[in-house]
Structures are given as C-alpha cells and as structure tokens.
Amino acid sequence: MSVDRRRFLQLTGAALAAPAIGGCGGHERIPASGVPRSNFDEDSTAEEVTEGLDLSGKIAVVTGCNSGIGYETMRVLALRGAYVIGTGRTLDKAQEACSSVIGITTPVELELSDFDSVVACAETIRSLNSPIDMLICNAGMRGGDREQVYGLEKHFVVNHLGHFILVNNLLERLYLSWQGRVVVVGSRAAYSSAPDAGIEFGNLRGTTNYSVGRAYGHSKLANVLYSLELARLLKGTRITSNSLHPGVINTSIDRNEPGFFQFAFGVLTAIGGKSIAQGAATTCYVATSPLLGSVSGQYFEDCNPVTVLGDNHMHDAAQAAELWKVSQALTKDYLLEIKRPDWEDFQNGARRRSKT
Ligand SMILES: NC(=O)c1ccc[n+]([C@@H]2O[C@H](COP(=O)([O-])OP(=O)(O)OC[C@H]3O[C@@H](n4cnc5c(N)ncnc54)[C@H](OP(=O)(O)O)[C@@H]3O)[C@@H](O)[C@H]2O)c1
C-alpha cells in the first residue's frame, strides 16, 4: 500500500511538475550578462526584498490581487507605502482583498477573458488621473476544460491577450511616472512545456495537439515574449518591461485540476516549492529595486536575471515581434493609439475634469 502511494505521488508529481508549475526540464540557466545582480535568492521573501524601501507616493496596479502571489504582492507593496490598485474578477473579491491589507488600496473589477471588462477596468484606473509606477500583470489561470474565447484558446486569451489590452490602455499613465515599470508574471512553463515551435501562430484556437500543460506553457511563453517586445518598443523611454518566474508555489493556480492533481501539487510544493511569501519576492524585487531603473527586456528567476540556454524561444526577438503584430490584429478594436502624453496636458486635463 505504501509503495502504491509512493508510486502514485511520483507519477502525479512528475505529471504535474513540468507542465503545471513550470519545472525547468533540464534547461540550463546562466546569469544574464550586463545586468546588475541582487543578493537575493530563492529563499528571499517579498518583505525581505523590499526592506528599507519607502514606496510612499508610488502607485502600483496588481492584477489578480485576491489570491496567491498577487495578494502577497499587493500586501507587501502597500506595507511599504505604495498606493495599490488591486484587481479581482469581481469587485467583491477585489474589495475583500484590498480591505484586508494594511495601507492604501483601491479595488477594481477585471475579467481578463472579457475584453470589454479589460477596457472598463483601464478606464476606471485612468479616471483616477494618476501616473502608474508599477503595472504588475500577475493574474493567470491554468486548466479546466478546453475552451475557446473569441475563437481563441482560453489560456492564450486570459494570460496573454487580456494583459496585452490592459497594458496598452494604461501605457499613457506609465509615461507620466518618473520611471514606470511593467512587470509580467510568466513561468518556467514558457520553456519547459511550451510547444517546440514556440508560439503556434497557426494553432491559436488550440485545436491540434491540445493539452492543459502545453496550452499553459504556450500562454506563459507569450507573456515572456510580449514583455521582451514591449521593452524593445519602449527603448529610449523611462518605462521598463521585464518578465519573471515566481517559483513553484502552492497557491490556487491548480483549482481547475482534478482533486488528485491538486493533492499531488500540494505534496510537491510542500517538499520542493516556495512559500507564498517567497513566491512574491521576484515580482516585488523587479517592481521596486533601485538597481533595475534602466533594466528592461530581461527574464528573472529567484530575484535575478537569467538567460535560458538550449532549445527554447525565451529570447526569440523575431517571434516576439511577430507575436506583437498578431496580438495587435486580434485585439485592435480594444486598443488605444499609444502616444506619449504631455505632462502639461495631463495636468490641464485633471484640472478640467475636477472643475466639472
Ligand atoms: N503558483 C505557481 O507555482 C506558479 C508558477 C509559475 C507561474 N505562476 C503564475 O503566477 C501568477 C499568479 O498565480 P498564483 O499562483 O498566485 O495563482 P492563484 O492563486 O490562482 O491566483 C491567480 C489570480 O489570477 C486571477 N485570475 C484567474 N483567471 C482570471 C481571469 N480570467 N480574469 C482575471 N483574473 C483572473 C485569479 O482570480 P480568481 O481567484 O477569481 O480566480 C487570481 O486572483 C499566474 O500568472 C501564474 O501563471 C504561478
């Protein structure tokens, strides 16, 4: 019986490790060259990486603030003095999360699978008339029945296209920050379980070779490549864009999986994973470290920038540019023309609005 249980754990653990939570699958990672390294590592917590930082006056947006890594990210940024706008799929969820942390927060509704909701969320945030210092694209889903939204595979829509629209609709506010940062929470699944060809432009509906792990990895690769291309497009501005893997953490990310998968994930993360406090560290580090003011287009693990060697598309600039074009075409009805706003226009606009 005990052997059976061990075997069960081994099998389910192995099944989960690579596709579900982004095991590195033997890929070698080396420190990215020319980028400052931190003294933090896989054991560091979000509180530790932000210790001593005064974020008063900074404004952060955190998507998926009601659960797991997003909640801890919001909690710690608010603790350090930042004003955090936290999104949840319903206003109630966002409200409950926001009201449970110490600091100043505002809840906003955001359902990433509904592009009208994304636009409405961005409009609500823009109506606050504030710059944005940190835009943290954290929300994400994995699993459930194979589904299409807008005729496209659901992971790709929720994890990538929803945030693609959100960032586009909020970019003008990042220009108004002294140094705006877009932080995209990706995953090692981007190189451990994405399709060999990388982004499957001919299979965005997910009709061939579908598996949850593959679809999740595909969407997480889209996160990383999106951030890479955004960094290229923003070169010469003060806005940076970086992506990261948070670690393997027992959050609710597996909520759509069968019960025994959830059990195995729990066991696996208890043995070799990070705590949620550690899981939010890389996000908080990339969002706030004074060392990273001009670092852009990098991919981070364990609070440090890495280059992933071998056969993968993590640093594939050509595929990133293609993904951008395709994403733009797919979401064109929801995008704003990106222009660099004038600070004076913004102030005049704010004054005009406050008079009415
Ligand atoms: N946990 C890990 O081991 C791990 C590893 C690598 C990467 N990540 C990434 O880390 C990020 C945070 O995940 P987590 O582990 O903290 O999981 P989590 O506890 O499940 O949190 C995910 C958050 O995203 C929100 N969300 C899900 N679908 C959404 C949608 N359609 N529209 C808007 N929001 C949506 C969830 O809202 P509801 O609560 O309402 O569903 C929740 O707030 C994700 O991007 C995930 O891919 C996690």
Image: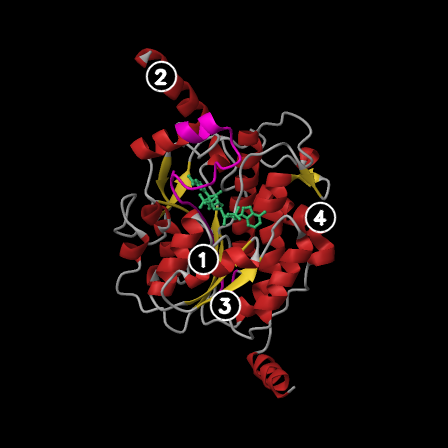
Q: CA distance from mark 2 to mark 1?
A: 37 Å
Q: CA distance from mark 2 to mark 4?
A: 47 Å
- 76 and 132: which is toward the camera: 76
The magenta segment: 235-264
Amino acid beneath label 4: Leu
Q: Earlier in the sequence, mark 3 or mark 2?
A: 2
Residue at mark 3: 132
Q: CA distance from mark 3 to mark 4?
A: 26 Å
Mark 3 and mark 1 residues within 8 Å of each other at the beta carbon: no
Q: Earlier in the sequence, mark 3 or mark 1?
A: 1
Q: Earlier in the sequence, mark 3 or mark 4?
A: 3
Q: CA distance from mark 1 to mark 4?
A: 32 Å
Amino acid beneath label 1: Ala
Q: Secondary structure at mark 1?
A: helix
Q: How is the image coloured?
A: secondary structure
The numbered dot on residue 330 is 4
The numbered dot on residue 97 is 1
Q: Can residue 173 be seen from the camera position used here? A: yes
